[in-house]
Image (cartoon, grey):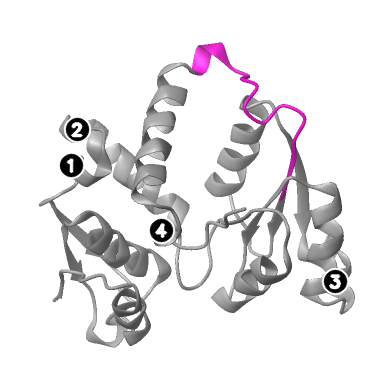
Amino acid sequence: MKHFLHETDLSKDEITEVFERAFAYKSGRSHRPTNDLFGQSWALLFYKNSTRTRVSFEVGIRELGGHPVILNQDATQIGRGESIADTVQVLSRFLDGLIIRTHGHEIIEEFAKSSTIPVVNALTDFLHPCQIYADCMTIIERTGDSRDPYEGLKGKKIAFLGDTACNMANSWILAGALWDFEVSLGGPAEYRPVDRISDFCKERKLEPTWIHT
């Protein structure tokens, strides 16, 4: 069983397959629903408000033949003080997967630690891996390069403007290290990327190429 908390949680072959399937699902949308998640129930547990992420996950689960279960912190016993470990152990008995959007990254890591079903990161304050996969898929589509991210993204230059200490900036830095492209970050000096993302890359023997101006 594999969780998806960071862009790097999947192997190279798995990442390539994710992109291949994503392109196939998009081009074959008229043939949905499929049976890929037939008979499965996946919960969306969102601590934070969401529009695009919430809708895309819920529709995606349905179009793959599964059943989305919508939760929020206040609708569970977590809101009344029950521990994450106890909650996720109960959810693991009923569900096939758990998609979480939350604040601190340590929260989703705690869910994954006690879960016996896959946990997917739909955004934390540290990273937003699903969004980065989708953005990189769009870049590959628009540039017409190979649909293998290791080939289609290599050597490219990506610019990110704004809060360069946010989760999206962190995820772009990590993606650049993973797929070998340069990331240029533009924003106020007080929003410079935090050391945490550089340390995270070093721990995984990745060498990000990024510039902050």
Distance from Cα at disc 4 to Cα at disc 1: 17 Å
The residue carrying mark 2 is 146
Instruction: Pick whichever of labels 4 and 3 is earlier in the sequence.
Output: 4
Q: Amino acid at mark 3?
A: Asp
SS at circle 3: helix
Could you tell me residue 193's position as x and y percent?
29, 79
Quarter-wise, where is residue 157 in the image? bottom left
The residue carrying mark 1 is 151
The magenta segment: 29-43
Marks 2 and 3 in Cβ contact (< 8 Å): no
What secondary structure characterizes most of the magenta part? loop
SS at circle 1: helix
Instruction: Pick whichever of labels 1 and 3 is earlier in the sequence.
Output: 3
In this view of the protein, which residue sits in the foreground, 197 or 75? Answer: 197
The residue carrying mark 3 is 86
Could you tell me residue 190's position as x and y percent?
29, 87
SS at circle 4: helix
Distance from Cα at disc 4 to Cα at disc 3: 27 Å
